[in-house]
Amino acid sequence: MFGEKELYSLKMRAAQGGPHEKGGRHISGSERIIEKNAVDKEVLAMLERAKYHQRGAADFISIKVELIKKEQIRYRQLLAFSQCEAASVEAGRKVALAELESAGVTPLAARKGLQAIAALPDSMRGAMLVNAVTGSRMDDLGNRGVRVTNMDVDDAEKFATALAQHGLQGDHVREALVLASKVAGGEGVVAELCWSDDPLYVTGYVGSAKNGYRRIQVLKKLHDSVGGRVFFIRPDTDVPALIHYLQEQVIFIRTGESASVD
Ligand code: WAQ
Ligand code: MG
């Protein structure tokens, strides 16, 4: 744990053709919370990642560093990790629909949500909030979507060790598990569907408080640069409160017991 050391939130976003807000194409983003003495190194690492990315070369990079107030911190448990069987895009998407339904999303909403990602002309920077019953969009953030930030694990070393024990490595799965655990802990969230927008990374998942992190090996074709996230929410959700939680609330993910599920 962090003791009395100062903590900083780091947020990076990179785009091509100018800043996101001026129509630039989203290249990559990253968010961490780290101790003061690790900030310089992490800022450099984020810069390197932004400059040389599978999605293309960035010509706009924003890195924000903010002090976190200890009293802002809340905790959520890491979602349990497990794998689904799927050897093709078709099989993977079928599994995703079944997983969403198992988590409490209606078949109609699951289909519409999956289609909303598949039909994107290019990737968004954030996620779409979608009604878990009707499948209609619930936020009005358009192309930007809701960007989940201000989260990290409570013990990065323990987390890395637990992941390695399951043969999991790399930024994608580490960041996805943290994000999915924060999202699943949001008031009104039923489930999340995600697949990467990196052309060489075809894996995704369905996350939910009910069933945990259900990894799906293949959800898109290799070299496809369109990916995204849909957060399926209950129709009665307080949307502004949920958006505030996702974008602002500082969350540490406890890596305790469930980091070691199959
Ligand atoms: N908040 C909201 N949406 C986000 C965020 C965020 N912090 N980060 C990414 N997205 C959205 C955005 O639309 C991206 O285009 C899309 O998700 C994909 O982002 O092996 O790497 O960072 O188990 O490319 C999942 C599988 C990998 C990991 C997901 O997503 C595994 C991934 P990416
Ligand atoms: Mg990406």
Image (tube, rainbow, N blue to C red):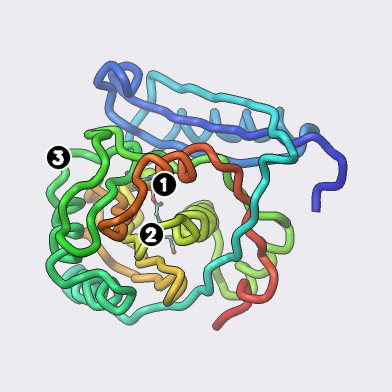
Residue 46: percent from the left, percent from the top?
56, 33
- Residue 242 image label: 1
- First in sequence: mark 1 or mark 3? 3
Residue 143: percent from the left, percent from the top?
23, 33
SS label for mark 1: helix
Res 141 → quadrant: top left
Residue 40: percent from the left, percent from the top?
71, 28
Q: Where 143 falls versus 177 (above or below)?
A: above
Alpha carbons under labels 1 and 2: distance apart: 8 Å
Classed neighbour count for the residue bearing mark 2: other residues with Cα under 10 Å, few (<14), some (14–19), many (≥20): many
The amino acid marked with disc number 1 is Leu
Q: Residue at x 58, y 46 (%)?
A: 151
SS label for mark 2: strand
The amino acid marked with disc number 3 is Pro
- Residue 189 image label: 2
Q: Residue at x 31, y 20 (%)?
A: 21
SS label for mark 3: loop
Whether label 1 touches label 2, CB < 8 Å: yes
Q: Which residue is mark 3?
A: 121
Res 111 → quadrant: bottom left
**Of marks 3 and 2, the one in the foreground:** 2
Q: Residue at x 20, y 39 (%)?
A: 122
Q: Is residue 87 visible?
A: no
User: From the image, which quarter does the C terminus lie in?
Assistant: bottom right
Q: Residue at x 51, y 55 (%)?
A: 182
The amino acid marked with disc number 2 is Val
Name the one closer to the observer, 121 or 250.
250
Res 194 → quadrant: bottom left
Answer with left or right where residue 212 lies relative to residue 85: right
Q: Is residue 235 visible?
A: yes
- First in sequence: mark 3 or mark 2? 3
Q: Where 175 falls versus 205 (above or below)?
A: above
